[in-house]
Image (cartoon, rainbow, N blue to C red):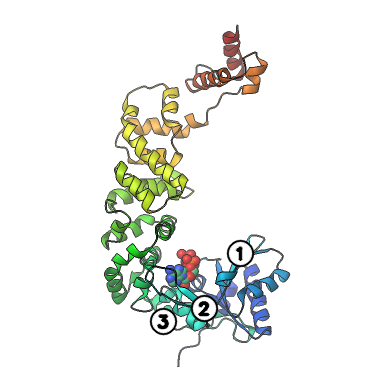
């Protein structure tokens, strides 16, 4: 007989009361129409681990969109529906909950998206990536809180194990390789012996995954608290070279990521900054290849290009005593993440100090007078305005003037 476990009190203690009330109401509504509603996936895992997670995923054995529409009458908000997948996202105040119709999935071709049909909660749990993510909690009032754990997820949480549900899991969907490493490193768990063997055997299946999906996984890695742990593990398991063979997951990278966190604290470094550091040691051609392989967004692609171009020119900043305005002109067109990556990666104290001067001070300095002020003062509208503003900006940067009055005097001198 499987042990009967209730998570009712954990839900009450760990979720905000707004969400507890919501799942109770949703469970009652589902029960009233003879359907079963469950809390599933990451939130169940995190309830058991006592980790905060308010991203609720609900699965209904029935029409989830219909239930979401009924819930919208109870919680005034909005829903975004995806009819093709039978899913809805319900948003109200600061809350957001995903509802999906229980489904079964079949992988016709490795790496491609699966074909989907409505199914039972058992089917829905079987399609999931790891045992620790394949648990559900019943929300109907008569069995509220009951844990459904068909694959030993709770045991695996206890033993700190990441295990796939079946032999074909990584081959069906190789993004699970990256997901597995992410959970392993985030939770300080280990891949189970057989799962690790299967992962190693299926690393080549990453080639079946589209650039868009791989990029999404990489972005999720870079949003982790300690992304370098995942990248170092990925290097060891020969997963990182699948992103690009020249990428390194080593002590240098770990040190730079750590320094990035110290520098940006109390916020987290952006995905762009981490990515710039990861790609820092690629050459121009390799970097371009990574950009196209991962179909990076325009903004991220620009960060990588800037990082590389700045690195190529960086020696200019090693000269002693450049004027502040020259430092500003040299750096200000590059994206902030590219500049920061170069600050962290450079080996010269002088370069470091010049970049830091730019980041801490120079980039905030602006002249007080505006284009309109200059027109009023008699400067001919047109390109001359921009020239004068630039001259004022330089004078401010070099501290030749420090007040608005000083700027006015300077301009009046030029007008006369
Ligand atoms: P995180 O804490 O990283 O957000 P999560 O478990 O909430 O973790 P999501 O990516 O939001 O992760 O996915 C929700 C659930 O959907 C997972 O818990 C898992 O059960 C399932 N899932 C997500 N991606 C896959 C996949 N590629 N293969 C199988 N199941 C998946």
User: Which of 312/262 is in front?
Assistant: 312
Residue behind label 2 places its C-beta within 8 angstroms of ligand 1: no
Q: CA distance from mark 1 to mark 3?
A: 29 Å
Q: Position of residue 339 (x, y in %)?
A: 41, 37
Left or right, 12 with reference to 184:
right
Look at the picture and state if 158 lies above or below 374: below
Whether tag 2 and tag 1 are in contact, CB under 8 A, the answer is no
Q: Determine the residue positioned at 49% across, 49% down.
A: 267
Disc assigned to residue 297: none
* Residue 261 against residue 395 in the figure, above or below: below
- Seen from the viewer's position, the closer of residues 351 and 304 is 304
Q: Exactly how many numbered labels are in the figure?
A: 3
Tell me the element at label 2.
Answer: strand
Give the residue at mark 1: 96
Q: Secondary structure at mark 1?
A: strand
Q: Is residue 273 above or below residue 168?
A: above
Look at mark 3 in the image and give the residue it sits on. 152
């Amino acid at each position: 007989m499987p042990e009967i476990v209730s998570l009712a009190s954990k839900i009450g203690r760990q979720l905000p009361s707004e969400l507890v009330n919501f799942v109770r109401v949703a469970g009652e509504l589902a029960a009233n129409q003879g359907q079963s509603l469950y809390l599933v996936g990451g939130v169940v895992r995190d309830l058991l681990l006592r980790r905060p997670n308010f991203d609720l995923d609900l699965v209904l054995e029935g029409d989830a969109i219909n239930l979401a529409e009924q819930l919208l009458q109870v919680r005034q908000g909005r829903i975004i529906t995806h009819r093709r997948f039978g899913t809805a996202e319900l948003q109200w105040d600061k809350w957001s909950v995903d509802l999906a119709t229980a489904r079964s999935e079949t992988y016709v071709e490795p790496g491609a998206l699966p074909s989907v049909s409505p199914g039972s909660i058992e089917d829905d749990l079987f399609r999931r990536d790891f045992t620790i993510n394949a648990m559900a909690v019943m929300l109907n009032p008569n069995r509220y809180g009951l844990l459904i754990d068909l694959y030993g997820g709770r045991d695996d949480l206890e033993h700190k194990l990441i295990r796939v549900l079946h032999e074909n899991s990584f081959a069906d969907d190789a993004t699970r390789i990256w997901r597995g490493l992410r959970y392993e490193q985030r939770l300080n768990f280990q891949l189970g012996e057989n799962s690790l063997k299967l992962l190693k055997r299926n690393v080549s299946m990453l080639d079946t995954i589209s650039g868009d999906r791989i990029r999404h996984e990489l972005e999720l890695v870079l949003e982790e608290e300690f992304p370098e742990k995942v990248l170092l593990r990925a290097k060891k398991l020969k997963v990182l070279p699948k992103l690009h063979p020249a990428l390194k997951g080593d002590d240098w990278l770990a040190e730079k990521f750590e320094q990035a966190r110290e520098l940006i604290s109390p916020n987290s470094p952006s995905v762009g900054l981490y990515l710039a550091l990861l790609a820092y040691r690629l050459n121009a051609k390799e970097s371009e290849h990574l950009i196209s392989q991962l179909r990076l967004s325009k903004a991220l692609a620009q960060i990588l290009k800037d990082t590389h171009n700045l690195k190529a020119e960086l020696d200019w900043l090693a000269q002693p005593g450049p004027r502040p305005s020259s430092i500003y002109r040299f750096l200000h067109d590059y994206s902030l993440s590219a500049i920061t990556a170069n600050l962290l990666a450079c080996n010269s104290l002088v370069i470091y100090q010049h970049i830091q001067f730019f980041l801490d001070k120079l980039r905030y300095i602006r002249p007080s007078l505006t284009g309109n002020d200059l027109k009023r003062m008699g400067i001919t509208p047109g390109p001359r305005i921009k020239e004068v503003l630039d001259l004022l900006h330089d004078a401010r940067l070099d501290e030749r003037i420090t007040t608005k009055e000083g700027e006015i005097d300077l301009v009046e001198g030029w007008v006369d």
